[in-house]
Amino acid sequence: MERTREKFVIGGLEFALKDGENPPKPKKLDEKQEAFLIATACYNPPGGRVRWTMQLLAEHLVKVGIID
């Protein structure tokens, strides 16, 4: 809220509402890791679960050694 107010004072309404350019963020997974993640998410979830959650997927990727 404070930044929006400051931008409004500096440049007016249009400037305050305009979202600035954001630099691209580096990917956390390479293509093979991403493919493995997608394949895992499309597969049956672990026993006792109805669906994969982000936490379950992250824990699985750590367990199989894809990420730290």
Image (spheres, rainbow, N blue to C red):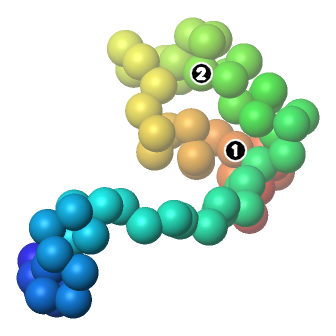
Q: Is residue 17 shown above or below 2?
A: above
In this image, 34 relative to 38: left or right? right
Q: Residue at point 21% right, 70% down?
A: 16
Quarter of the picture holding the N terminus: bottom left
Q: Is residue 12 shown above or below 27?
A: below
Q: Specify few, some or many for label 1: CA neighbours under 10 Å numbering under 14, 14-19, or 20 or more.
A: some
Identify the element where label 2 is drawn: helix
In this image, 19 relative to 56: left or right? left
User: Disc 1 designates what residue?
Assistant: 61
Do we see residue 20 in this rendering?
yes
Q: Residue at point 43% right, 67% down?
A: 20
In three-dimensional space, the C-alpha distance between marks 2 and 1, rounded to whole angstroms, equals 11 Å
**In the image, what residue type sits under mark 1?**
Leu
Q: Residue at point 53% right, 65% down?
A: 22
Residue 44 on image: x %, y % = 57, 10
Residue 65 on image: x %, y % = 82, 51
User: Disc 2 designates what residue?
Assistant: 41
In this image, 35 relative to 18: left or right? right
Do we see residue 3 in this rendering?
no
Identify the element where label 1 is drawn: helix
Q: Residue at point 51% right, 65% down?
A: 21
Residue 6 on image: x %, y % = 16, 88
Q: Earlier in the sequence, mark 2 or mark 1?
A: 2
Q: Is residue 60 shown above or below 24?
A: above
Quarter of the picture holding the C terminus: bottom right
Q: Is residue 26 shown above or below 9?
A: above
Q: Nearer the viewer, residue 64 or 34?
A: 34
